[in-house]
């Protein structure tokens, strides 16, 4: 019982530290995000952060994983509940933008990480793996449409990269214009990629 309690407490502490790291990244930017600043936000010592994560790099990786989890938890149920691949693609686009609306600080934190934390010595950055997962997950939706006969023949990876490229351009626009109309953009992106993917009659 004691061991289970410690595990629960440790997981709660890790979640607290990640949440504080997100706040600091979003509010102060990557360059000014230090373990000391995160510790102050969390009202703990830097030693506690080091105990749970080892260092800033490992903590940043945990932040990326947490933002990805938030997005997945929002998006996947909406996508898989759709009756057709066309509706699945619509849900994919709309839920991506809905995530940006609902989780603004995690989004800003992720943008800071992607922009300012390259991989060490030519290795992939901390978001590289998640970026590839995002492409392959989208390819599954496109393959669904190919199998069902809803989508025309096209190179699925190229189309997935094009769709992701359009979506990934949105955070930069939100930074420049926080009041940007995400609903209008979602409708336009759905129209664009519905027309781009559908099989011609």
Image (cartoon, rainbow, N blue to C red):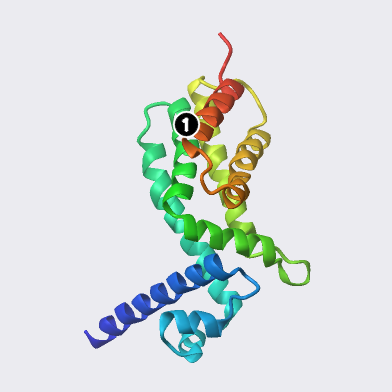
Q: Is residue 64 above or below residue 143?
A: below
Give the percent coordinates (x, y) of residue 161: 65, 40
Residue that label 1 marks:
90
**Nearer the observer, 45 or 9:** 45
Q: Is residue 23 above or below residue 55?
A: above
The answer to whether residue 110 is seen in the rendering is yes
Give the percent coordinates (x, y) of residue 194: 54, 24
**Nearer the observer, 87 or 188:** 188
Which residue shows up at 52% across the image and 86% down it?
A: 50
Q: Is residue 12 left or right of residue 124?
A: left
Q: Quadrant of the C terminus?
A: top right
Which residue shows up at 46% across the image and 37% down it?
A: 94
Asked which quadrant contains residue 153, the reply is top right
Q: Is residue 133 left or right of residue 115?
A: left
Which residue shows up at 50% across the image and 39% down it?
A: 182
Q: Is residue 83 left or right of residue 55?
A: left
């Amino acid at each position: 019982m004691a061991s289970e309690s410690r595990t629960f407490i440790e997981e709660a502490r890790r979640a607290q530290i990640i949440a504080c790291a997100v706040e600091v990244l979003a509010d102060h930017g990557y360059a000014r995000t230090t373990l000391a600043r995160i510790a102050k936000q969390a009202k703990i010592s830097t030693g506690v952060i080091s105990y749970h994560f080892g260092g800033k790099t490992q903590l940043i990786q945990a932040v990326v994983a947490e933002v990805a989890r938030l997005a997945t938890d929002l998006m996947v149920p909406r996508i898989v509940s759709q009756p057709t691949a066309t509706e699945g693609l619509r849900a994919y686009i709309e839920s991506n933008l809905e995530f940006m609306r609902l989780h603004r600080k995690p989004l800003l934190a992720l943008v800071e990480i992607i922009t300012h934390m390259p991989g060490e010595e030519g290795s992939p950055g901390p978001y590289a793996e998640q970026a590839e997962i995002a492409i392959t997950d989208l390819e599954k939706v496109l393959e669904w449409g190919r199998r069902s006969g809803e989508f025309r023949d096209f190179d699925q990876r190229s189309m997935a990269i094009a769709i992701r490229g359009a979506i990934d351009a949105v955070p930069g626009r939100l930074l420049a214009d926080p009041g940007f109309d995400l609903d209008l953009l979602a409708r336009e992106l759905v129209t664009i990629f519905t027309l781009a993917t559908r099989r011609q009659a």
